[in-house]
Image (tube, rainbow, N blue to C red):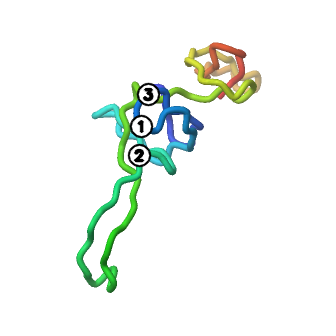
Amino acid sequence: MQIKKNDNIIVITGNNKNKTGKVLKVYPKVNRVIVEGINIRKRHTKPSQKSQQGGIVEKEAPIHVSNVMIVDPKTSKPTRIGSKIIIDEKTGKKKIARVSKISGEML
């Protein structure tokens, strides 16, 4: 899965189409992500020690990775992701960087 925590994404299909947000949590085993302010669901909770009041709580639900794309930092449009090998000049070690396919900008 190429989407990581704190990435800016855009929803490409579904009820929340064209909305953007930041990835809060990633579930790689089930290919789902939780995005800030997207796919909001209402949960009815009973009063407990944590919440004395109880009531209806709005919470983000996971969304499938195939329904989101990363936003290009340069053009602010949805983009695919490629990888590029970069050699560190000081240590001489190879690093793999994620790169936008549209602008070539590093993510």
Identify which residue is drawn at 36% across, 67% down: 57
**Left or right, 76 with reference to 29:** right
Residue annotated with mark 3: 13
Residue annotated with mark 2: 39
**Left or right, 93 with reference to 23:** right
Q: Look at label 3 and name its amino acid.
A: Thr
Please identify the quadrant where the N terminus is shown. top left
Label 2 element class:
loop
Label 2 or label 3, whichever comes before in sequence order? 3
Judge by depth and name the residue closer to the eye, 42 or 71. 42
Please identify the quadrant where the C terminus is shown. top right
Identify which residue is drawn at 49% across, 33% down: 17
Residue 34 percent coordinates (x, y): 42, 45
Q: Is residue 67 above or below residue 50?
A: above
Question: Answer yes or no: do the residues labelled 2 and 1 have beta carbons within 8 Å?
Answer: yes
Circle 1 packing at 10 Å, graded few (<14), some (14-19), many (20+), is few
Residue 68 percent coordinates (x, y): 47, 29
